[in-house]
């Protein structure tokens, strides 16, 4: 599962941050996830609990922050909101749009002890 390795990557970040910032326990992790990141939130939540078990982030709360996906439409000459990568422009129906945001997967905030 793709989400499992994502969580392992998150744990690595938490561990290196704990060494750098001198904390021993993570109580809350807030992740920003764009709809184009390819992440399944349910699978991510499940993997998070599995991967964090026995680590410094065991029993921490996972907060998902949904980020909007946007694209630049050449026809409209405007930024539009899309739902999926290969969507047409929701305003004019043009396929000539370029994704500008929505692929994020990043740690927004940590709460630590
Ligand atoms: Zn358009």
Image (cartoon, grey):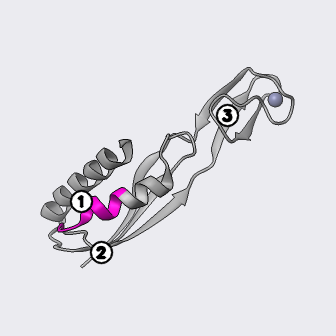
Residue 29, image x, y percentages: 37, 66
The single residue placed furthest to the right in the displayed view is: 92
Left or right of 81? Residue 31 is left
- Position of residue 112 relative to residue 93, above or below, is below
The local secondary structure at tag 1 comes to helix
The mark nearer the N terminus, 1 or 3, is 1
Q: Which residue position is annotated with label 1?
A: 14
- Give me the C-alpha separation between circle 1 and circle 3: 32 Å
Left or right of 86? Residue 63 is left
- Depth check, mark 3 against mark 2: the one in front is 2
Residue drawn at the location 87% of the way across and 29% of the way down? 92
Q: Which residue position is annotated with label 3?
A: 71
Residue drawn at the location 25% of the way across and 69% of the way down? 57
- Give me the C-alpha separation between circle 2 and circle 1: 14 Å
Q: Do the residues labelled 1 and 3 touch (CB within 8 Å)?
A: no
Q: What stretch is highlighted in magenta?
A: 47-55
Q: Please say whether residue 50 is one of the residues in the magenta stretch.
A: yes
- Position of residue 95 relative to residue 2, above or below, is above
Q: Which residue position is annotated with label 2?
A: 59
The mark nearer the N terminus, 3 or 2, is 2
């Amino acid at each position: 599962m793709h989400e499992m390795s994502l969580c392992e990557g998150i744990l690595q970040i938490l561990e290196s941050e704990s060494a750098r910032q001198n904390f021993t326990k993570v109580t809350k992790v807030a992740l920003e996830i764009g709809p184009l990141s390819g992440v399944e939130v349910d699978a991510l939540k499940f993997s998070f609990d599995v991967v964090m078990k026995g680590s410094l982030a065991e029993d921490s709360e996972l907060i998902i922050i949904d980020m909007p996906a946007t694209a630049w439409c050449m026809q409209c000459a405007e930024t539009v909101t899309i739902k999926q990568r290969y969507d047409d422009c929701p305003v004019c129906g043009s396929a000539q749009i370029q994704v500008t945001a929505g692929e994020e997967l990043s740690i927004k905030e940590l709460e630590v002890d």
